[in-house]
Image: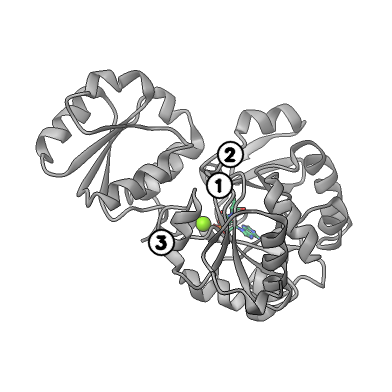
């Protein structure tokens, strides 16, 4: 079937035929909603500047926030960077790819400025989701893809979320619920230090086990400005409900008393029983964005979150919670 004659342009099962349709859309310069193991992405071919512009437009994405380029092979990754970048990709990519690690490396001349927004680096990731990998191979080109949400909203972890945010005009491949439910970890190597620009599905400990030099969180080392990821300065991941963080059971209970109306409480698994008299939901990295969207669908006004030691120790989770609560990020 030719993609031009395709009429149903919404959520599509990941059959070989639909992957071919999606590849046709990408080759013709269009965009496609794609499943990944982290969150859903809105993909466009790096060879089509029109597709890149459409991604920014559909998301309402700030124009100073560069995109991640997704590849299906080491060869594709190496073509996007210089010798210095190839060494980093060899070292980290060979261990963590395919998977949720994004590596920022010097960009080769061929990488369009529309993707890097004029930076001299490019962010590269080889995803592990089989549907996305097959799509990259079938399309025959690396695919730029940010998360497929409207900028500022929680990232989509199901095909329905993509449709909710981007409407009925985007062809979406349905790969089911995302395995991690949170975005990739973004890293950059400078000298022998590995900087974590955005905490994500790969933990600092996993990186430390693999990297012989220092592993530092860029924002906590006062290195912002030297090493930074443009996206981290924005308020992100926010539901319409206001998100209020609490740091003890008593704290959470007193907040629930203050916000009696249409409030839900998100707690780690061990507290679910204790909060059973309230509208309690499970807090975890895998379900966080899903719960935010579910709360909005129920027109929840306030989401109280119990951040115990385990949550505070989970860099990726506390990072998303603080942003959703408006504690970090400029709005
Ligand atoms: O898991 C993920 O990473 C998902 C899936 C779709 O792959 N993608 C994703 O993309 O989260 P996005 O655009 O929502 O976030 C990309 C992050 C942003 O914070 C952006 O600023 C940063 O990566 N980034 C991209 N290129 C960069 C570069 N050259 N230098 C520093 N940071 C970069
Ligand atoms: Mg995003």
* Gap in angstroms between the C-alphas marked 2 and 3: 24 Å
* Gap in angstroms between the C-alphas marked 3 and 1: 19 Å
Point 29% across, 52% down: residue: 297
Point 57% across, 39% down: residue: 179
Closer to the camera: disc 2 or disc 3? 3
Residue placed most toward the observer, 58 or 18: 18
Mark 1 residue crowding within 10 angstroms, few (<14) / some (14–19) / many (20+): many
Please give the residue where the numbered disc 3 appears in the rendered image.
Answer: 164
Image quadrant assignment for residue 302: top left
Which is nearer the N-term, disc 3 or disc 1?
A: 3
* Gap in angstroms between the C-alphas marked 2 and 1: 6 Å
Residue 307, image x, y percentages = 34, 30
Q: Describe residue 313's horizontal placement relative to residue 115 as left or right.
A: left
Residue placed most toward the observer, 209 or 289: 289
Which is nearer the N-term, disc 2 or disc 3?
A: 3
Mark 2 residue crowding within 10 angstroms, few (<14) / some (14–19) / many (20+): many
């Amino acid at each position: 079937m030719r993609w031009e004659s395709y009429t149903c342009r919404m959520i599509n099962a990941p059959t070989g035929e639909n992957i071919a349709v999606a590849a046709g859309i990408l080759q013709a310069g269009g965009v496609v909603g794609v499943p990944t193991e982290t969150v859903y992405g809105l993909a466009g071919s790096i060879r089509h500047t029109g597709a890149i512009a459409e991604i920014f437009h559909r998301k309402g994405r700030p124009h100073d926030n560069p995109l991640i380029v997704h590849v299906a092979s080491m060869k594709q990754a190496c073509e996007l960077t210089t010798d210095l970048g190839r060494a980093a990709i060899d070292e980290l990519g060979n261990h963590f790819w395919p998977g949720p690690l994004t590596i920022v490396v010097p960009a080769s001349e061929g990488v369009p400025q529309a993707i890097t927004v004029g930076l001299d680096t490019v962010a590269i990731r080889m995803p592990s989701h089989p549907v996305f990998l097959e799509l990259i191979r079938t399309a025959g080109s690396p695919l730029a893809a940010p998360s497929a949400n409207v900028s500022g909203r929680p990232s989509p972890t199901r095909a329905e979320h993509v449709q909710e945010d981007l409407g009925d005009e985007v062809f979406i491949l349905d790969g089911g619920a995302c395995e991690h439910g949170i975005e990739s970890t973004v890293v950059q190597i400078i000298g022998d230090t590995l900087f974590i620009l955005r905490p994500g599905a790969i933990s600092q400990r996993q990186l430390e086990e693999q990297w012989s030099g220092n592993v530092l969180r860029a924002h906590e080392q006062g290195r912002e400005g030297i090493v930074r990821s443009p996206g981290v300065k924005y308020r992100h991941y926010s539901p319409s409900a206001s998100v209020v963080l609490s740091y003890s059971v008593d704290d959470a209970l007193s907040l629930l008393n203050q916000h009696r109306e249409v409030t839900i409480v998100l707690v780690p698994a061990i507290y679910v029983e204790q909060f059973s008299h309230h509208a309690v939901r499970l807090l975890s990295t895998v379900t966080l964005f899903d719960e935010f969207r579910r709360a909005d669908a129920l027109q929840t006004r306030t989401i109280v979150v119990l951040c115990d030691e385990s949550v505070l120790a989970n860099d990726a989770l506390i990072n998303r919670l603080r942003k959703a609560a408006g504690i970090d990020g400029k709005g």
